[in-house]
Image (spheres, helix red, strand yellow):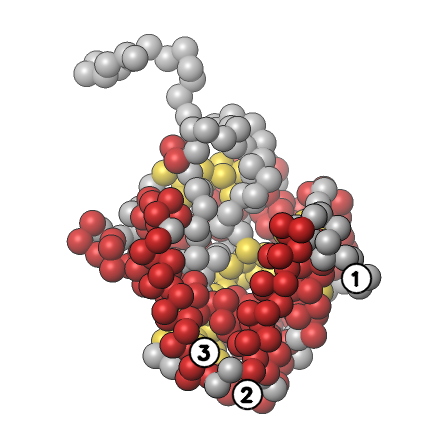
Amino acid sequence: MTSSSPFADGPGPAAVYFAYRTGAWLAEHTPPAVADRLAAWGGRIAYKRAHGKRKTVESNLGRVVGPEDLDRVVKAAFGSYAEYWLETFRLGRYSHDELLGMVEPVGDSVAVIEDAIAAGKGAVVITPHLGFYDLGVAWVGAKGWAFTTVAEVLRPKALFEWFARIRQRHGLTVLPARDGKSVRVRLGEVLDAGGTVALVSDRDLGRRGIWVTFFGERTTFPASPTLLVVQKKVPLIAGSITKHGSGFRLQFENVPYVLTGDEQADISAVAQVTADAIERMVRAAPEQWHLFSTNWPSDERHLRPRGREADPAAPPASDPPQVGEVQA
């Protein structure tokens, strides 16, 4: 991978780049106990001072937990997010043996992936912004499994390239998220060759995804995971890695789906199956859900509309108000 200049987009993005690199150096060279305390302190500071971001997290997690637990879970989410960055930054200090020892696969998780690889038909692994997915990627690489993923191209581009190199050192192939169609073609080629594609699937960055019901409310999910599954007819696997005590638990499970041959109906059905699987993973550890941006149209009235097309579940605009409704 070629190296871009950190200053290509100006001094501001360059400062961000060097801040990340400095954080990574400190994480790798600071005694782990000290780094852990610093991360916990940073999470508490962010929770107290990032008022706008905290409101967003409260809104997101308010769909997952009841009001009696919300403040505790939101506070824990900020702490978990700080820990996520610490673990991401110090990936370089872990050997393969250390990675394999610090992560515990749950149940038949290893068999789920090994069976999919052995079948040679390819597979799509979906995961949310939950827990410590970069650590999970490193563990996957230590197991010798070759996954391919897509990552947002950050500014400056040098920052994206640095993150991509970290992941590639652990066996992950990283494609830049630019034109969705061309990226899907490349991912389709990986699946055709029997490879495994892993995609973070709970945030529709392009805002042209597929409508689903997620935590009881309509929103869009990224299109690529669903389209790849429907078009390539490959296994769909849900994966997550969360912290428990001083260790980490990783889980993979097959997600069943049925294709009818009606492509549009199948796309909607598989997208909803994906949303349901991600919802289950988030409910299992809501305090480790690192979704710090808006994710539902009701929280995004100032942004452009979502979806490749109108929400098929929405009532027609011309519908008259029902009895008991007040028309604005």
* Amino acid of disc 1: Ser
* Residue 164 spot, x, y in % from top left: 68, 64
Label 1 crowd (10 A; few <14 / some 14-19 / many >=20): few
Circle 3: residue type? Ala
Residue 172 location in percent, x, y? 68, 68
Residue 59 vertical placement versus 3 (above, below): above
Q: Earlier in the sequence, mark 3 or mark 1?
A: 1
| Residue 292 x, y percent position in the rendering | 43, 51
The relative height of residue 25 versus residue 181 in the rendered view (above or below) is below
Q: Residue at x 62, y 47 (%)?
A: 224
- Earlier in the chain: of badge 1 and badge 2, it is 1
10 Å crowding of disc 3: few (<14), some (14-19), many (20+):
some
| Kind of residue at badge 2 | Glu
Q: Nearer the viewer, mark 1 or mark 2?
A: 1
Residue 115 percent coordinates (x, y): 60, 73
Q: Is residue 280 visible?
A: no
Q: For the point 43% across and 28% down, which residue is it?
A: 301
Q: Which image quadrant is residue 74 in?
A: bottom left
At x 56% / y 82%, what residue is drawn? 29
User: Which residue is the site of mark 2?
Assistant: 98
- Alpha carbon separation for disc pair 3 and 2: 18 Å
Q: Which residue is mark 1?
A: 3
SS type, badge 3: helix
Q: Secondary structure at mark 1?
A: loop
Q: How many marks?
A: 3
Q: Nearer the viewer, residue 171 or 144?
A: 171
Task: Give the SS element for disc 2.
Answer: helix
Q: Residue furthest front?
A: 11
Q: Say if residue 325 shows up in the picture.
A: yes
Query: Quick check: 72 left or right of 222?
Result: left
> What residue sits right under mark 3 in the picture?
35
